[in-house]
Image: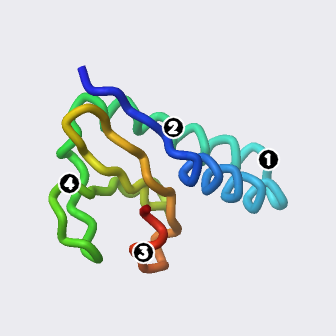
Amino acid sequence: MVEVVWTARSLNDINQIAEYIAKDSFTYAAGVVERIFSLEKLIKKTPEFGRVVPEFNNKKIREIISGNYRVVYRITDLQIQILTVHHGARLLTKRKIK
């Protein structure tokens, strides 16, 4: 089975999201983080479930929407890399997924 790897960038993104939301509600922040991490099982089981990221139009770079956030990942032969967790209202740049 393919390994799912959370990149340092994606973990940092999640940490920043949690810190921002926790300013208003620690409980809500914890729920958002839990939902994001729970996507790992779905991605691992069915990697092509997520839609192709429109900004890149590359079938190996996909995303799943979780609330207001886009969980962007890359499918390779050996692993699935969670590249970033990005607010859905913002466009992605190539720099953001490297």
Tell me which label, 3 or 2, sits earlier in the chain.
2
Relative side of 8 to 22, left or right: left
User: Label 1 belongs to which residue?
Assistant: 26
Residue appearing at x 18%, y 64% in the figure: 58
Q: Nearer the viewer, residue 38 or 82?
A: 82
Q: Amino acid at mark 2?
A: Phe
Q: Is residue 67 above or below residue 28?
A: below
Figure colour scheme: rainbow
Label 2 Cα crowd, 10 Å radius (few <14 / some 14-19 / many 20+): some
Q: Residue furthest top?
A: 1
Q: Is residue 3 above or below residue 98?
A: above
User: Label 2 belongs to which residue?
Assistant: 37
Tell me which label, 4 or 1, sits earlier in the chain.
1
Tell me which label, 4 or 3, sits earlier in the chain.
4
Q: Amino acid at mark 1?
A: Phe
Horizontal and vertical percent position of residue 36: 50, 44
Residue appearing at x 51%, y 45% in the figure: 7
- Say what secondary structure mark 3 lies in: loop
CA–CA distance in space, label 1 to label 3: 27 Å
Horizontal and vertical percent position of residue 45: 24, 29
Label 1 Cα crowd, 10 Å radius (few <14 / some 14-19 / many 20+): few
Q: Are marks 1 and 3 in contact (CB under 8 Å)?
A: no
User: Label 3 belongs to which residue?
Assistant: 92
Hey, which quadrant is residue 65 in on the image?
Answer: bottom left
Relative side of 44 to 83, left or right: left
Tell me which label, 2 or 1, sits earlier in the chain.
1
Q: Are marks 2 and 1 in contact (CB under 8 Å)?
A: no
Q: Amino acid at mark 4?
A: Lys
